[in-house]
Image (cartoon, rainbow, N blue to C red):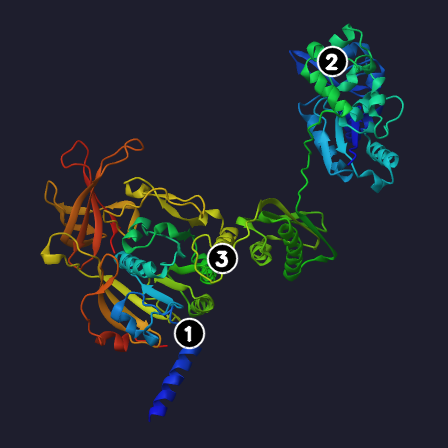
Amino acid sequence: MNAKQELVSKLQQDILLWQGFKLQGKEAAEAIGLGELENVFPNGVFPKKAIHEFITVLPEHAAASDGFIGGLLSVLMKDGAACVWISTARKLFPVSLCLFNVEPERIIFMDVTREKDVLWIMEEALKCEGLAAVVAELNELSLIESRRLQLAVEGSGVTGFILRKDARKAVSTVATARWKISPVPSVTEDEMPGVGFPRWKVELTKVRNGNPGSWIMEWGGDRFVEVLPALKTAAWYDHEERQIG
Amino acid sequence: MQKRYVSIWFRHLLADWQLIRRPELCDIPFVFAAPDHGRNMITATSPLAASQGIEIGMRAADAKALCPGLEVLDDKAGRTTILLKGLGEWCVRYSPVVMADDFSVDGLFLDVSGCTHLWGGEREYLKEIVSRLKSKGYTVRVAMADTAGAAWAIARFGKVTPLIAPGTHTEALLALPPEALRLPENTLAKLSKLGFYRIRSFIGMPRSVLRRRFGEDFLARLGQALGTVDELITPLQVPVLFQERLPCLEPIKTRIGIEVAISRLLEHLCLRLQNEGKGLRTGVLTCYRIDGKVVQVSIGTSGATCSVSHLFKLFELKIDQIRPALGIELFVLEAPKVDDILPGQEALWAGKPGLDDQSVIQLLDRVTGKMGPDVIHRYVPAARYWPERSANRAVSITEKPIAQWHIDRPRPTELLSKPVPIEVMALIPDHPPKFFIYMGIRHVVVKADGPERIEREWWLDVGEHRDYYQVEDELGQRYWLFRSGHYGGEQRYQWFIHGFFA
């Protein structure tokens, strides 16, 4: 019985390897700072060698996603590496990244006019090993294009983030995770007046080889704080958008 | 190395040029004239007109009286210079260093050191120049000597031989008049007044005496002729130091062929650069097509590099711009701008070094090469509070911030490039809005921070100050609103939305 279980877990590891999930070494497997949320990913490690999709329909969602990515970048760029931010209509206010412990001068913005150019730059940037992460604002992404990006990521290990505006065109892509970040009311200490720390509803609608879920997170000034354990089995996505693998 | 110079004197440059274009003028005396102080003065004459006693500097009307059939043509300022430049570029076939004579704009200097043996000796070399120019229609006098000044003198005033053997130019100069030294008019008049008709009569005089009488310029010209003072040579075509050529046996028409040519040229060029410790900053690939057209593409790098693979990738992006048509027979790769390359220290472990990482710089080069330099932006903090001007564009990838980012105040993650007017209900005087309508949707404000007043930079633009509020609606969406101006001021106040918080 025991041997059988070992065999099954071994086979699972093999499948993960074939799908591009390399088992990271001890140094590389450090936490990204998302706490409990990281357990839903395969092996319980936030996949850095991967493409993460963020669905942002409203500008408010885009702002929340920018903040969430900023929080992730603060960990990814800790060793001094640079980040590339590609966009056709950029609204990101560089100064605000300071609030998420990211130095805005280490972000290289590339502003182009066509979506095709965004894809070209993104693929080139994902192949560049000196970068920590690449963020691209895109509307459309086909399966073939996303597969090219995934291959580039697997070669270099640069994390890719894609901010997609149109949810209705959410065709299947090979992105490892699909996120939806929406703002929720903030809470101030002791009911003090004013606006509190940024607080979001973090929905993972798709994780390859993992378990999707929904959480309430807050940026506590220097790190992510999980507010309350949200229901892990929210019913609606189970029969709507659940895509695994 | 023994220096040798050739001076070419075009005796009737403009007239020869006109005769080549209009051969029917060969039997008619003609002159070029340009208006000067209301008179038409002769600036150039044809050989036929000169033989009838017409000189440069005469009035055109006088010349017509002297020679009834004279044809007067209009001269254009600067035409001689353009002609000389064209002839000089043609003369690059004889020597890489060709200079136009800017004292008496009618000749060329060639630095022929080490060139003459290619034509079988100095005499054959001079003969070749004279006969080639003559077959084109230009009558010239040439001379070769150890200094440019001596060659100039012999070409114009020499009577014995145009070929002055090495080391004998001083003797050759002795018998010439002082005009051979390229002196200004007033010095020449002074010399003739004092009875110096030959160079030999004053060449032995003490320098201090000559300086007192004729000035420093006179000594400089004398020294240039004798070789004691260096003459400044400014070549018409500056030779490119790092250049590689690839002639092809068969014309190249395919993309793969061009790629092979580029990589072979780059290998040779980068090896040379590497040996000299240099790196390429700009590269120009010139393709000579068999139909006589020339196609050029150029690349630039943000840091000196001699990596073949990186430079090849940059050229690869430009191959689409090369139209081979019937085929390319010659590729020339030049590096007009090179910089010293600093050998980076080999790291024992691979880290992620940041912005000046080689792979990041190569990525920026590729993006710049494909889409132009305006694509890439990087921001450094500016010491200003006005939100739109709070960041400056960095000029280079290595620029370090000199100010601090303002992080003591809340700033939105998304900033609208232009604030959008909104409708608002707010209590006066200083309260945040109760609700606001943006894009047709009514947002009820639940929580708010503010106001934060930001004054306009009055030395740059006029207008009202802004009072910023951070507000949160009942859904938890956070906005950055501001009121422009005071309530009840002389100007109308207006509410705007300027950004979205995370």
Q: CA distance from mark 1 to mark 2?
A: 89 Å
Does residue A241 appear anywhere in the picture? no
Tag 3 secondary structure: helix
Do badges 1 and 3 share one subunit? no
Judge from the rendering whether residue B130 lies leftward or rightward of residue A131; answer left or right.
right
The residue that appears at 27% across and 32% down in the rendered structure is B458
Judge from the rendering whether residue B295 lies leftward or rightward of residue B433; answer left or right.
right
Q: Quadrant of the C terminus of chain A?
A: bottom left
Q: CA distance from mark 1 to mark 3?
A: 23 Å
Does residue A90 appear anywhere in the picture? yes
The residue that appears at 33% across and 94% down in the rendered structure is A1
Against A153, is B123 above or below? Answer: above
Which residue type carries mark 1? Answer: Lys
Residue of label 2:
B57
Judge from the rendering whether residue A181 lies leftward or rightward of residue B216; answer left or right.
left
Give the camera-side residue of B67 and B102: B102
Tag 2 secondary structure: loop
The residue that appears at 69% across and 10% down in the rendered structure is B212
Give the camera-side residue of B165 and A228: B165
Chain bearing tag 2 is B
**Mark 1 or 2, closer to the camera:** 1
Tag 1 secondary structure: loop
The residue that appears at 25% across and 66% down in the rendered structure is A202
Judge from the rendering whether residue B153 lies leftward or rightward of residue B447; answer left or right.
right
Residue B249: x %, y % from top left: 76, 57
Which residue type carries mark 2? Answer: Gly
